Image (cartoon, rainbow, N blue to C red):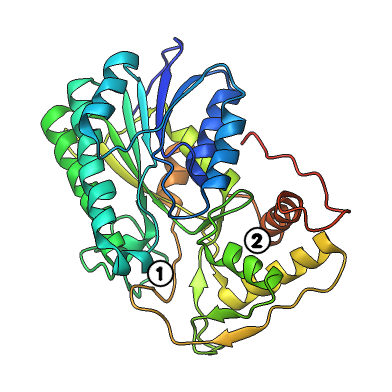
Amino acid sequence: MHLNNKKEKKTYLVTGSAGFIGYFVCKKLLFQGSSVIGIDNLNDYYDVNLKQTRLEDLNTYENFTFFQEDISDRSALENVFLKYKPNIVINLAAQAGVRYSIENPDVYMQSNVTGFYNILEACRHFPVDHLIYASSSSVYGANKKVPFEETDFVDHPVSLYASTKKSNELMAHTYSHLYDIPATGLRFFTVYGPMGRPDMAYYGFTDKYFAGEPIKIFNNGDFENDLYRDFTYIDDIVEGIVKLIPRTPSGEGDVKHEIFNIGNNNPEKLMHFITSLENALSKSLGKTVEFNKIYEPIKPGDVPRTYASTDRLHQAVGFKPKTSIEEGLQKFADWYVQYHKLTENAKEVQVTNS
């Protein structure tokens, strides 16, 4: 492992810059004074207005340049590389969602496989100091051994989404080996927070509550063997990414490719998470909130538990998540109530720079 001690100003390319994690990563880099090039196709997988809100905030920074492009468009991507020659590439563009991959597999192959191939080709022809890319905890499939460690067997994915993320890790390893591209893959564990993705359970539950609809919990009502999730607050995710940027991967042998879990290392029962969300919304609204719950069987592609070992990341850069579920959900609830103007007494919420 080598730390890059160069002090010159770097140019960052962040794909998926109008997405949840991409937005916060851009905001952190811009706040630090870096030049950031953002790429996003602004697709309608979820509410485009939320993506536009994130983008409008990023556009207030003079050192931010945005292109509405799809990374599966190779020529468009190469034009950006040719013009700006980024030093660091952070690839967060992907078609997300486990269940949606069962309904619409084509978009996963286009964005997550072809798109990532285009990123690798661009980094090959326009060499970069470091490529950081999003993988996912879903690559662990239905592994029963916990916590999940980076050295665990991950050849039995249970969704196409997971398969595309595993393929990204293999492709990055190969390109690092063949073309000396320093690359780091990050297996994210259930990221949540303000301005998050509406397709995520916590956001969807909140939407359902205000629509007067019941929420569906896919655990068969089995509270003894409830689902576990390693919920990770967005600020902790961003801190981990930023700490990894100057770290040139050492990898195995001469391959400069490494993979890290980036999670909370503290899984929560789904029902505890839901109760904490009810409590957070109750505080934000000044009244008792209780979801109407319907219990159903676990869905195809879902996994019963996720639990990240973050030892490797802590040893590498000192990363240690510090946001509790209660604190993180309160920040989300306060933002949600203010963003959707749900009460005259809604708190003004500042989106953090981290």
Q: Secondary structure at mark 1?
A: loop
Tell me if I can see residue 239 in this picture: no
Image quadrant containing the N terminus: top left
Nearer mark to the viewer, of 2 and 1 = 2
Mark 2 is surrounded, within 10 Å at the Cα level, by few (under 14), some (14 to 19) or many (20 or more) other residues, namely many
Q: Which corner quadrant of the image does residue 316 belong to?
A: top left
Query: For this rendering, which residue is in front, 4 or 35?
Result: 35
Query: For this rendering, which residue is in front, 313 or 201?
Result: 201
Counting from the top left corner in percent of width and height, residue 16 is at 42, 40
Counting from the top left corner in percent of width and height, residue 6 is at 41, 13
Mark 1 is surrounded, within 10 Å at the Cα level, by few (under 14), some (14 to 19) or many (20 or more) other residues, namely few
Q: Is residue 198 above or below residue 186?
A: below
Query: For this rendering, which residue is in front, 354 or 1?
Result: 354
The residue identified by callout 1 is 146
Q: Are marks 2 and 1 in contact (CB under 8 Å)?
A: no
Counting from the top left corner in percent of width and height, residue 157 is at 26, 67
Specify the amino acid type for callout 1: Val
Q: Secondary structure at mark 2?
A: helix
